[in-house]
């Protein structure tokens, strides 16, 4: 521990703390634009400088470690003036277009400037030439708005292990982007959107699908349905001033109806369907390996996270056979909506428009993959992020706080609690274990309240083992088998898992990978700014939603049972194979165009 004085207040903090974290413990907020929680500080923005007694120069609070006996002033005249100059210089270069920028209500640069009382900029600085990179299906970059904070570089390289963005040049001429000033479609970008999630300004955003959705809703010849991912219900409220983790499931359904959607459905329905298909696929692989002694690709990896899929296609193509062939719940929904449901409402697939509300920017890329057209047309037409839905509701003058709760529509609107927890890291694994264990043994998963605690929480890589006993006759070959599972979130953690498997250090049977930190609740399209405190609140809300339901296991979903009875017949059957399963393609690390 170290004892120091900050603004005449003496406090004791861990000796590995920085001045920024120490000040936070003392209830003192020091502004910063480049710092990212859990990542090594780089002191790039110089907005957090403070005065340390005896030091010749001001210190960047984010990267300066505490020292016993330090005397620090965060608001001395010298520190205030230096911060103000740093922010004014950033403003002088920043071509913000605040009147039309979609970040004008939650721009961190503007918030810092307002807090400092900056009403005019003293410097007439040159501005970077505008260059828009809209080469990818999911993301748009505008370098004229970039303030060179390097947050996107940090999250792409350190959290995701991708490194698609890099600072090039020096000083004013510094450019943040893909190597050799290429567009994003020319490098190994997985479209996860974590860069957009941490960008403090509007330099990187999701590609906007709002106008396309409005056009569909205004077209009387189109039957427009919407699906809502489980993570949305614990985050959408933040767009309307609710605390993170506030569940707005019913209000969300009501708001979507007022926007004019013909049907409001729940992606939870196809999350349950995914468990039926994926669970059956997993058991089939085990049977082939243990009984038929075939060379089967194990461990099996989950396949519902499109950023993870593209990461594997780029960096680990040798593991493509290990990926479950199941489409994501989003894509299963589109295929089923334009076939099974279309027949129920007497519509042709061409007459239907399927809109997804997703926490994920990579879903915009996923829906445009050429293989995602099992219905005969593109299965999912548009993807809106949580942020986009918030903007669309505000455009329509709809305030969630003023709406009463409404249910989802029937036939594709029921989801179990197991489907809800798809939103959290470890949730897909827990949902799968709830169903697979019960199918194999005829008994409920022997875990407290059905929760598999070892795979929950924000630890980067989590493991669990479960010994199977008391099997039903069909699965006798699994008697006494210990199933080893793993869960990772964030692609850098995924890389760690894959490398341990390559080296033969770990033998897993089933592995869940989520692209984004915390899982879908921390997706690249969720309300900003998402740190671990926000992630934990959203995670807790999702578990609350699960625990509040009577239906908590995917195989008990009556609408999924009806779908199999009326249409699909059986998991992994011929129709399921055509509509619900897919294949993957190895990609060059440097591409001519993304596809």
Image (cartoon, rainbow, N blue to C red):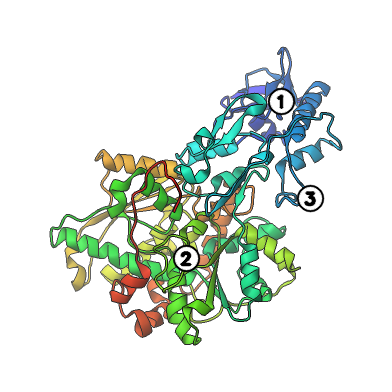
Residue tagged 2: 330
Kindly state the secondary structure of the residue where label 2 is placed.
helix
Tell me the quarter of the image containing the N terminus: top right
Q: Is residue 434 left or right of residue 112?
A: left
Q: In this picture, is 226 found above or below 111?
A: below
* Residues marked 1 and 3 touching at CB (< 8 Å): no
Kindly state the secondary structure of the residue where label 1 is placed.
strand
Distance CA(mark 2)–CA(mark 1): 46 Å
Who comes first in sequence, dot 2 or dot 1? 1
**Image disc number at residue 49:** 1
What percent of the width, then of the height, locates residue 496?
37, 40
Res. 12 visible in picture: no
Q: Is residue 79 left or right of residue 340?
A: right
Q: 291 or 14, which is in the foreground?
A: 291
Q: 541 or 253, which is in the foreground?
A: 253
What percent of the width, then of the height, locates residue 328?
42, 63
- Which residue occupies 43% across, 81% down? 340
**What is the number of callouts on the image?**
3
What percent of the width, then of the height, locates residue 168?
56, 29
Who comes first in sequence, dot 1 or dot 3? 1
* Nearer mark to the viewer, of 3 and 2: 3
Q: 247 or 521, which is in the foreground?
A: 521
Residue tagged 3: 99
Distance CA(mark 1)–CA(mark 3): 30 Å
* Residues marked 3 and 2 touching at CB (< 8 Å): no
Neighbourhood count class around disc 1 (C-alpha, 10 Å): few under 14, some 14–19, many 20 upward? many
Q: In this picture, is 193 found above or below 181?
A: below
What percent of the width, then of the height, locates residue 358?
55, 61
């Amino acid at each position: 521990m170290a004892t120091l004085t900050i603004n005449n207040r003496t406090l004791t903090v861990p000796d590995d703390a920085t001045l920024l974290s120490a000040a936070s413990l003392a209830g003192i907020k020091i502004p910063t634009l480049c710092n990212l929680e859990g990542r090594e500080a780089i002191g790039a923005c110089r907005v957090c400088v403070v005065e340390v007694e005896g030091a010749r120069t001001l210190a960047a609070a984010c990267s300066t470690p505490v020292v016993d006996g330090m005397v620090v002033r965060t608001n001395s005249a010298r520190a205030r003036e230096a911060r103000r100059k740093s922010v004014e210089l950033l403003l002088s270069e920043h071509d913000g277009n605040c009147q039309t920028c979609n970040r004008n209500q939650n721009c961190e640069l503007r918030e810092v400037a307002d807090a400092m009382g900056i009403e005019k900029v003293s410097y007439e600085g040159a501005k970077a030439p505008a260059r828009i990179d809209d080469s990818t299906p999911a993301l748009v970059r505008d370098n004229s708005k970039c303030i060179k904070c390097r947050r996107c570089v940090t999250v792409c390289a350190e959290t995701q292990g991708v490194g698609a963005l890099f600072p090039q040049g020096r000083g004013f001429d510094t450019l943040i982007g893909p190597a050799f000033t290429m567009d994003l479609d020319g490098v190994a970008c997985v479209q996860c959107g974590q860069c957009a999630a941490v960008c403090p300004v509007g330099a990187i955003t999701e590609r906007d699908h709002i106008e396309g959705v409005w056009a569909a809703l205004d077209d009387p010849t189109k039957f427009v349905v919407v699906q809502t991912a489980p993570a949305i219900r614990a985050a959408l409220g933040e767009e309307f001033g609710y605390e993170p983790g506030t569940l707005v499931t019913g209000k969300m359904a009501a708001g979507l109806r007022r926007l004019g959607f013909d049907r409001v459905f729940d992606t939870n329905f196809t999350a349950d369907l995914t468990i039926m298909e994926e669970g059956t696929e997993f058991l089939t692989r085990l049977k082939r390996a243990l009984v038929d002694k075939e060379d089967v690709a194990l461990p099996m990896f989950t396949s519902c996270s499109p950023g993870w899929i593209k990461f594997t296609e780029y960096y680990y193509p040798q593991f493509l056979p290990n990926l479950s062939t199941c489409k994501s719940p989003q894509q299963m929904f589109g295929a089923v909506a334009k076939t099974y449901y279309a027949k129920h409402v007497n519509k042709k697939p061409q007459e239907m428009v399927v809109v997804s509300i997703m926490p994920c920017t990579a879903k915009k890329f996923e829906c445009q993959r050429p293989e995602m057209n099992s219905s005969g047309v593109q299965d999912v037409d548009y993807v809106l992020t949580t942020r986009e839905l918030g903007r669309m509701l505000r455009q329509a003058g709809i305030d969630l706080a003023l709406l009463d709760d409404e249910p989802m529509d029937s036939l594709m609107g029921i989801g179990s609690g197991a489907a809800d927890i798809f939103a959290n890291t470890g949730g897909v694994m827990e949902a799968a274990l709830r169903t697979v264990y019960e199918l194999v043994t005829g008994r409920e998963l022997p875990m407290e309240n059905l929760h598999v605690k070892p795979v929950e929480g924000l630890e980067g890589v989590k493991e669990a083992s479960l010994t199977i006993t008391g099997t039903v006759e069909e699965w006798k070959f699994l008697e006494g088998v210990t199933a080893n599972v793993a869960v990772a979130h964030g692609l850098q953690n995924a890389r760690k898992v894959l490398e341990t498997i390559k080296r033969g250090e770990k033998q897993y049977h089933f592995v869940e990978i989520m692209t984004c930190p915390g899982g879908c609740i921390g997706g690249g399209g969720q309300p900003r700014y998402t740190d671990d405190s926000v992630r934990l609140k959203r995670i807790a809300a999702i578990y609350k939603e699960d625990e509040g339901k009577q239906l908590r296991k995917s195989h008990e979903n009556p609408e999924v049972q009806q779908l199999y009875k009326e249409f699909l017949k059986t998991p992994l059957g011929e129709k399921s194979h055509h509509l619900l399963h897919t294949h993957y393609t190895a990609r060059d690390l440097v591409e001519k165009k993304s596809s």
